[in-house]
Amino acid sequence: MADAATESSWCEISVPKIAGNLLSTLKRMPDNTQLCAVVKSDAYGHGIENVVPLLMEQNIGCIGISSNAEARAVRSAGFAGRLLRLRTATPQEVKSAIGDRIEEMFGAPAAVRSLIETLGQEALPKLHISLNAGGMSRDGLELSTARGRAGFFEMLELVPDQIVGLCTHFPSNEPVELAESIQRFHDDQAWIFTNCDLRRQDVLVHAGSTLTLHSGQDPKADMMRCGAILYGIAGPRPDFQSALALKSRVVSIGEYPKGSTIGYDRSCCLSEDKVLASIALGYANGYSRRFSDGGEVLIRGQRLPVMGKISMNTIVADVTSLPAIDVGDEVVAFGQQGSQVISSVAIEDLTGTIMADLYADWGQRNARVVIQP
């Protein structure tokens, strides 16, 4: 575990906030619907080792991962339940993870044939058929076409005893589009159970993500796969709270006269004398160059503008208005300090991306300092 006192930049991870978000998520789950807790991208940058114990305390029976490394981290944390890979894997990935007991997701006969050629019929893992259902068009089987329906029967013939799940991923959570997607998924299920020997009671049906849960629409599935809401990226306040803060420190303070330029390309020129603080944070830490025009930080509870272009390891803030500042002062680039907050809304508006993108980046580029109960 990292120590903030010795780090120049770090992500502060609040275990109590993740625990609270998990409880709020479980309260919002539709009746008779399980939660598959998603810990992709090292739990969205929060650290799988910090999240899995909380999931085990709440008897979560299924965890969603993407990579073999994530699967091994989940198993190393003591989880013995279902592990579901939330994308199609290469046969080599599947083979190397047999010992981790991952249930795999496939949506094309060619991928299943390749898997059989690599592993052999006897070594196949449990499989979930991914249905496109008019959705993401990336790795799901499209049953609206004759080719897609023939592909389903081919997959069923290839792996008659391994199919344990049917799933889809909704591309939009706008109310009308989501309702249409849910209906399409149920239509596809109805076709399957009418035209083959698979029995509904023997198959885990899962669909829906954080945004689906947040929408309030019930996909009427056995399980929903939610990740972002566990980390406070989505969900109404105060029931859900951001569990990650991005922090750094002041490493230098200087006085600069009117006319001085700041950073690369002289993109910022001082219109008056200023006191500037250099901060040990930059795009190498995931603090993107998109923050160059409009970025702000918190120092001693005061909101201060970022000046000039973001460098690889350094940003500059205008601290002229601070009555006092010292080298080593804590800087908040995202999160709360005193009564001031650099919020998700402000960050997303400035960067044009979503917090899940930034969390995954920040949490894996910086040391993690864990706040325990």
Image (tube, rainbow, N blue to C red):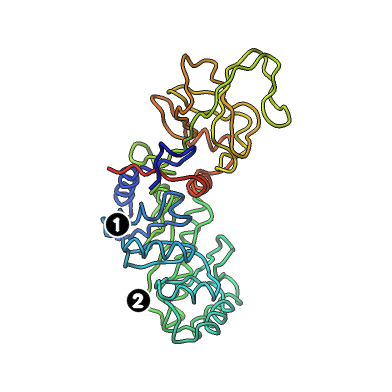
* Location of residue 121 with respect to 99 vertically, above or below: below
* Location of residue 312 with respect to 96 vertically, above or below: above
Specify the quadrant that holds the C terminus: top left
Residue at the disc numbered 1: 31
The residue at the point 60 percent across, 41 percent down is 283
The residue at the point 29 percent across, 58 percent down is 56
On residue 257, which mark appears?
Answer: none
- Pick whichever, 86 or 39, lies toward us: 39
* Left or right relative to 232: residue 345: right
* Left or right relative to 168: residue 109: right
* Location of residue 227 with respect to 201 vertically, above or below: above
On residue 202, which mark appears?
Answer: 2
- Pick whichever, 208 or 36, lies toward us: 36
Residue 216 image offset from top left, x and y in percent = 39, 48
Give amino acid for label 2.
Asp
**Residue 221 lies in quadrant:** bottom left
Count residues near mark 2 (Cα–Cα under 10 Å), then give few for <14, some for 14-19, many for 20+.
Answer: few
The residue at the point 50 percent across, 69 percent down is 130
**Residue 63 lies in quadrant:** bottom left
Q: Residue furthest right?
A: 265
Give amino acid for label 1.
Asp
Helix, strand or loop at disc 2? helix
How many marks the image carries: the answer is 2
For marks 2 and 1 on the same chain, the one whose residue lies earlier in the sequence: 1
Residue 361 image offset from top left, x and y in percent = 53, 47
Helix, strand or loop at disc 1? loop
Residue 309 image offset from top left, x and y in percent = 65, 32
Residue 99 image offset from top left, x and y in percent = 40, 75
- Pick whichever, 89 or 187, lies toward us: 89
* Left or right relative to 346: residue 63: left
